[in-house]
Image (tube, rainbow, N blue to C red):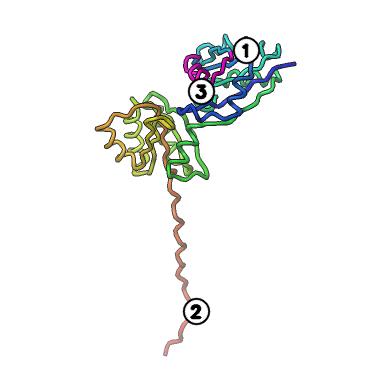
């Protein structure tokens, strides 16, 4: 019987945020394919999980995918995990997933923590509709082009950013978006978790004296909806028959 590929969500910081089901699956599968085995080993050690680990990331995916697919065809079950959160969301795994689907291998998602939804929920911004954009390009020209397009988005926008680029990105957001509300969620669920709300200008002022560290999620308010202007009453010229007769 062909094995199953499990897409397992793991904690984004606090190790207690693993689900009962994810814990059980990680114990029961034959192999855990991890983005960084050293990182995942800490989670396994914390919960006493002794399942074999193998590395699977963007730099070895072409070499490792055929090996993992063969294991699945032989009846082995595999859990795919990233360093934190839900795999495939700005993390490796899509390459393996699409090829497993083509081979008619059963894929089972195990839901759990997500930095995207965690940051959105605490941002104080509308949650009914949002757009996730991931990491912006490193090159300034490409990054600004995307931000200019996002400035027209009416839904809440969610981005990931690194500490050493956050000030540059906030400066560009301030210039392109104007005085838009946003939230910075840093080190979510970890000891030094921090959520800052305000405009890009206000947060930049803070970061000028306090260097940000850790993983950062940016949540930006969508473009305000423009109010429809009321239609002006058209002036009408009275029909000659309706004119007041002259004395």
Q: Nearer the viewer, mark 2 or mark 3?
A: 3
Judging depth in this view, the residue of 217 and 141 nearest the camera is: 217
Q: Nearer the viewer, residue 128 or 225?
A: 128
How many marks overall? Answer: 3
User: Compared with residue 194, is residue 3 higher up or lower down, i.e. above or below?
Assistant: above
> What's the mark number on residue 76?
none
Q: Is residue 239 above or below residue 130?
A: below
Q: Main secondary structure of the magenta part?
A: helix
Does the magenta-highlighted stretch encompass residue 100?
A: no
Element type at mark 3: loop
Q: Residues within 10 Å of mark 2 (few under 14, many from 20)?
A: few
Q: CA distance from mark 3 to mark 1?
A: 18 Å
Query: What residue does disc 3 label?
Result: 91
Q: Which residue is mark 1?
A: 68
> From this viewpoint, which residue is outermost toward the right?
1
Q: CA separation, marks 2 and 1?
A: 89 Å
Secondary structure found at label 1: helix
Question: Which x, y percent locates residue 54?
Answer: 55, 12
Q: Is residue 40 magenta?
A: yes
Tags 2 and 1 touching, CB below 8 Å: no
The quarter of the rendered structure image containing the N terminus is: top right
**Residue 52 pos. (x, y %):** 58, 12
| Horizontal side, residue 145 vs residue 50: left or right | left
Residue drawn 31% across the image and 38% down it: 203
Which residue bears the numbered disc 2? 240
The Cα atoms of the two marked residues, 2 and 3, are separated by 76 Å
| Quarter of the image where one finds residue 124 | top left
Q: What residue span does the magenta drawing correspond to?
A: 37-51
Q: Give the image quarter of residue 221.
A: top left
Q: Nearer the viewer, residue 184 or 151?
A: 184
In front of the other: 43 or 74:
43
């Amino acid at each position: 019987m062909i094995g199953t590929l499990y897409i397992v969500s793991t904690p984004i910081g606090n190790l207690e945020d693993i689900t009962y089901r994810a814990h059980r699956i990680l114990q029961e599968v034959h192999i855990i394919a991890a983005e960084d085995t050293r990182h995942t080993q800490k989670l396994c050690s914390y919960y006493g999980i002794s399942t074999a680990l193998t590395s699977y990331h963007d730099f070895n995916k072409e070499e490792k995918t055929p090996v993992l697919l063969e294991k699945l065809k032989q009846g082995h079950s595999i859990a795919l995990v990233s360093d934190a959160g839900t795999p495939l969301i700005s993390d490796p795994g899509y390459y393996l997933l699409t090829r497993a689907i083509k081979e008619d291998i059963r894929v089972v998602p195990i839901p759990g923590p997500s930095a995207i939804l965690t940051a959105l929920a605490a941002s104080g911004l509308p949650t009914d509709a949002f757009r996730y954009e991931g990491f912006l390009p490193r090159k300034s020209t490409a990054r600004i082009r995307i931000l200019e397009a996002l400035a027209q988005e009416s839904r809440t926008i969610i981005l990931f950013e690194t500490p050493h680029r956050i000030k540059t990105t906030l400066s560009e957001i301030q210039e392109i978006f104007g005085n838009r509300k946003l939230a910075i969620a840093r080190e979510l669920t970890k000891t030094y978790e921090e959520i800052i709300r305000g405009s890009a200008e206000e947060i930049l002022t803070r970061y000028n004296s306090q260097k940000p560290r850790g993983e950062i999620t940016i949540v930006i308010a969508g473009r305000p909806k423009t109010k429809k202007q009321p239609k002006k009453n058209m002036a009408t010229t009275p029909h000659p028959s309706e004119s007041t007769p002259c004395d």
